Image (tube, rainbow, N blue to C red):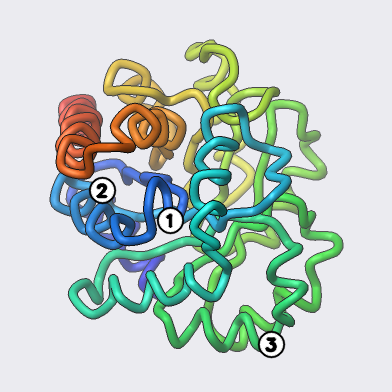
């Protein structure tokens, strides 16, 4: 059993729901990323989702697109992201780290080389936004050999038949994208999301996490009543832009937001 699954199981055994926090590696500055990762864990984050900067992040809204741009100014490459994970692992051997990004940098590095280096760095899972499971065979095999979990996305428009196939290809957890738009777009129809999550959970034994549109404790808590975990991204990344010039203020703001969400999740579960 990998670190991702064991952590999710432990959270469930405590009667809680998993909290996943997304930040872009190198945003707002590479020197801050590892410290922010540790700060997230202090405030109750169970899994860190680390965005790999890319020049054309087509699934992202303006907030996270700007985060990618801020990181790319500092020439944060896939290899540098893996070095950040390795640095994080020097002090934290328990918290799972999932990379979220696009196929292009992995393709450039080579599947086997990426899987090898990711494993050595301490990566536990991979979400490749622009790689559907039908086309992921060679990369999935390379990941499997290194015990890294491939995680795929479900959307509000996903058919039942395709949902089953996506769930069968996933490991660790399945990621439900709660909005039809990009990250940070629109507002959640919480009732509709909860109904859809309940429907999808019947199709897989894997934990189902919900992301896109969860901004604070008020939006996280009702979703967590039906989902196994929530993913918070744009709300955190927004702070990166607001406090770009003040690392200490940024850290405190991120910790306060995450603390609010963790508190709301704990209060919503018996």
Q: Residue at x 47, y 42 (%)?
A: 209
- Choose top left, top right, bottom left or bottom right for residue 85: bottom left
Quadrant of the snapshot with the C terminus: top left
Residue 45 shows which numbered tag?
2
- Choose top left, top right, bottom left or bottom right for residue 241: top left
Q: Is residue 116 above or below residue 227?
A: below
Quadrant of the snapshot with the N terminus: bottom left
Quick one: label 2 or label 3, which is nearer the N terminus? Answer: 2
Q: Which residue is mark 1?
A: 26
- Choose top left, top right, bottom left or bottom right for residue 223: top left
Q: Residue at x 55, y 21 (%)?
A: 193
- Give the x, y percent position of residue 87: 30, 76
Quick one: label 3 or label 1, which is nearer the N terminus? Answer: 1
Q: Are marks 2 and 1 in contact (CB under 8 Å)?
A: no
Q: Mark 3 or mark 1: which is in front?
A: 1
- Name the secondary structure under disc 3: helix
- Name the secondary structure under disc 2: loop
Say if residue 164 shows up in the picture.
yes
The residues bearing labels 3 and 1 have C-alpha atoms spaced at a distance of 24 Å
Quick one: label 2 or label 1, which is nearer the N terminus? Answer: 1
- Give the x, y percent position of residue 251: 20, 42
Label 3: few (<14), some or many (≥20) within 10 Å?
some
Q: Which residue is mark 3?
A: 112
The residues bearing labels 2 and 1 have C-alpha atoms spaced at a distance of 19 Å
Viewer-closest of 121 and 11: 121
Viewer-closest of 73 and 261: 73
- Give the x, y percent position of residue 63: 52, 29
The residues bearing labels 2 and 3 have C-alpha atoms spaced at a distance of 30 Å
Label 1: few (<14), some or many (≥20) within 10 Å?
many
């Amino acid at each position: 059993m990998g670190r991702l699954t064991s952590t999710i199981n432990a959270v469930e055994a405590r009667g809680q729901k998993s909290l996943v926090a997304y930040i872009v590696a190198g945003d707002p500055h590479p020197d801050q990323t590892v410290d922010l990762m540790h700060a997230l864990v202090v405030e109750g984050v169970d899994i860190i989702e680390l965005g790999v900067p890319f020049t054309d992040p087509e699934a992202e809204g303006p907030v996270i697109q700007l985060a990618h741009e801020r990181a790319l100014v500092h020439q944060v490459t896939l290899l540098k992201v893996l070095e950040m994970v390795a640095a994080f692992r020097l002090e934290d051997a328990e918290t799972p780290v999932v990379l979220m990004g696009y196929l292009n940098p992995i393709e450039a590095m080579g599947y086997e080389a990426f899987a090898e280096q990711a494993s050595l760095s301490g990566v536990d899972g991979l979400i490749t936004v622009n790689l559907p499971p039908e086309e992921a065979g060679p990369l999935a095999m390379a990941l499997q050999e290194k015990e890294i979990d491939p995680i795929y996305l479900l959307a509000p428009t996903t058919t039942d038949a395709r949902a089953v196939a996506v769930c069968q290809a996933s490991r660790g957890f399945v990621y439900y994208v709660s909005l039809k738009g990009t990250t940070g777009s629109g507002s959640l129809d919480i009732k509709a999301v909860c109904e859809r999550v309940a429907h999808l959970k019947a199709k897989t034994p894997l934990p189902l996490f919900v992301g896109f549109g969860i901004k604070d404790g008020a939006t996280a808590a009702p979703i967590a009543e039906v989902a196994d975990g929530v993913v918070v991204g744009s709300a955190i990344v927004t702070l990166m832009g607001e406090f770009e010039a003040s690392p200490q203020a940024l850290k405190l703001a991120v910790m306060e937001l995450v603390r609010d969400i963790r508190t709301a999740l704990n209060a919503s579960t018996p």
